[in-house]
Image (cartoon, rainbow, N blue to C red):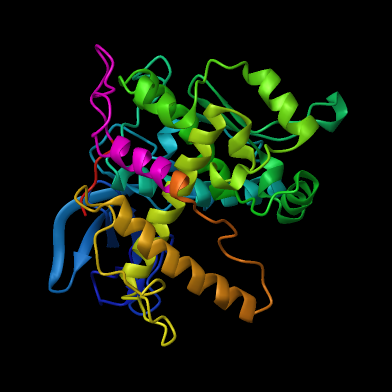
């Protein structure tokens, strides 16, 4: 994600900031124009501030701002109470428990970053009111008294995320138990929303045959496939065909895992480009680990080859830095040529080069649009 600056004083600010430390102005993120705005109170709303004075624009914070979990803005004259990201929330945890609110805040931070990327890609973002299988989120806590343990997953547009996944110790415990090299809240969101986009862009978007040619036939029994995966472990030689061992369990999971990695990659490359990163190791005589990230990763003209080459250099540099600090690799995966081909399918899909428009008859127009 790109760096932002305070419009009132030009101080560098970040995506989740709510106050400029230099000039003291309140800050809010405006998703449609992809801007961070400096704000001054104006009655029951705010006006945006830039060097030289006020602007006529008036804004309100998303209603979830009062819980300290959202800094996104809504036009002051809008009837909406929730921002473009939070309007998809169907259920949040019991906020009378302070511990729940803290965990929910971590979930919202991950969810908002995911929505930033979806908006940058100009993908459809229908709610349940706009589409019978519109995207909705339920953040649920386990109920030990009833013996109910929440499972993270997707079902016909509803993404359920276990609140326990926001607890770092619990999530790490689960990661080790599952033998996973990587497990994050952001990864959960990106993976589960990938299942929804399979429905919207592949199933309903005329891309089934093209998708099956790369990822396999999703009509293979899903339950049996997962049982076999957990009973027998990943397929032998999965590294040559899949981005992760879990991706090898079923074509749906292969698609969702590849989708999640595509979002990981483009978001991180935008960060690198925003910082003006150039990687040119002195020992890299063949240019394999050399890259200049001065390109627009979200531009539809950017090729998957450019993205993959830049990612190889950046991820290797970041992994080496983590090792120097005694930390695990930031990106503990190797992308084979087959996997890069699958990432290329996702790249073409999100840019409208595979299948057809996914808009259902009578649905409201997609609201997933933002400026560069």
Question: Compared to 248, does 3 lie above or below?
Answer: below
Q: Place residue 349 in its image quadrant.
A: top left
Residue 258 position, x and y percent, is 48, 41
| Quadrant (top left/top right/bottom left/bottom right) for the N terminus | bottom left
Residue 282: in magenta span:
no
Residue 135 in sight from this viewpoint: no
Q: Place residue 220 in its image quadrant.
A: top right
Q: Hey, which residue is sitting farthest top in the picture?
A: 361
> How many numbered discs?
0
Apparent side of residue 250 relative to residue 195 in the rendered image (left or right): right
Residue 152 in sight from this viewpoint: yes
Q: Which residues are magenta?
A: 340-367
Residue displayed at 36% across by 62% down: 309
**Which residue is more in the foreground, 100 or 159?**
159
**Which residue is more in the foreground, 303 or 158?**
303
Question: Compared to 158, does 30 lie above or below?
Answer: below
């Amino acid at each position: 994600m790109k760096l932002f600056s305070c419009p009132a004083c030009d101080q560098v600010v970040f995506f989740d900031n709510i106050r400029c430390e230099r000039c003291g102005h309140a800050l809010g993120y405006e998703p449609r124009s992809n801007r961070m705005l400096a704000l001054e109170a104006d009655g029951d709303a705010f006006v945006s501030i830039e060097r030289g004075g006020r602007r006529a624009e008036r804004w309100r914070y998303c209603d979830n701002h009062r819980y300290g979990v959202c800094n996104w803005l809504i036009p002051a004259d809008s009837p909406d109470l929730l921002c473009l990201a939070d309007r998809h929330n169907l259920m949040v945890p019991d906020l009378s428990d302070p511990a729940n609110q803290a965990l929910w805040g971590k979930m919202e931070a991950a969810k908002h970053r995911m929505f930033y990327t979806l908006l940058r890609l100009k993908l459809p973002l229908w709610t349940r009111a706009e589409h019978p299988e519109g995207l909705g989120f339920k953040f649920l806590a386990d109920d030990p008294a009833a013996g109910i343990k929440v499972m993270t997953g997707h079902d016909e547009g509803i993404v359920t995320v276990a609140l326990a996944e926001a607890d770092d110790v619990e999530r790490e415990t689960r990661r080790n138990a599952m033998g996973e090299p990587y497990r994050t809240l952001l990864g959960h969101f990106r993976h589960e929303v990938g299942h929804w986009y399979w429905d919207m862009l592949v199933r309903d978007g005329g891309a089934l045959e093209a998708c099956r040619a790369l990822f396999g036939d999703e009509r293979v029994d899903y339950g049996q496939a997962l049982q076999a995966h957990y009973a027998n472990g990943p397929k032998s030689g999965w590294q040559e065909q899949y981005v992760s061992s879990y991706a090898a369990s079923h074509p749906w999971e292969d698609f969702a895992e590849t989708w999640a990695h595509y979002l990981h990659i483009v978001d991180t490359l935008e960060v690198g480009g925003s910082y003006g990163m150039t990687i040119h190791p002195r020992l890299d005589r063949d240019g394999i680990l050399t890259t200049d990230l001065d390109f627009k990763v979200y531009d539809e003209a950017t090729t998957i080859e450019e993205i993959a080459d830049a990612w190889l250099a950046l991820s290797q540099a970041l992994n080496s830095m983590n090792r120097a600090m005694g930390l695990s690799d930031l990106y503990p995966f190797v992308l084979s040529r087959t996997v890069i081909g699958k990432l290329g399918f996702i790249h073409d899909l999100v840019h409208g080069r595979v299948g057809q428009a996914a808009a259902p008859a009578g649905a409201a127009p997609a609201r997933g649009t933002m400026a560069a």
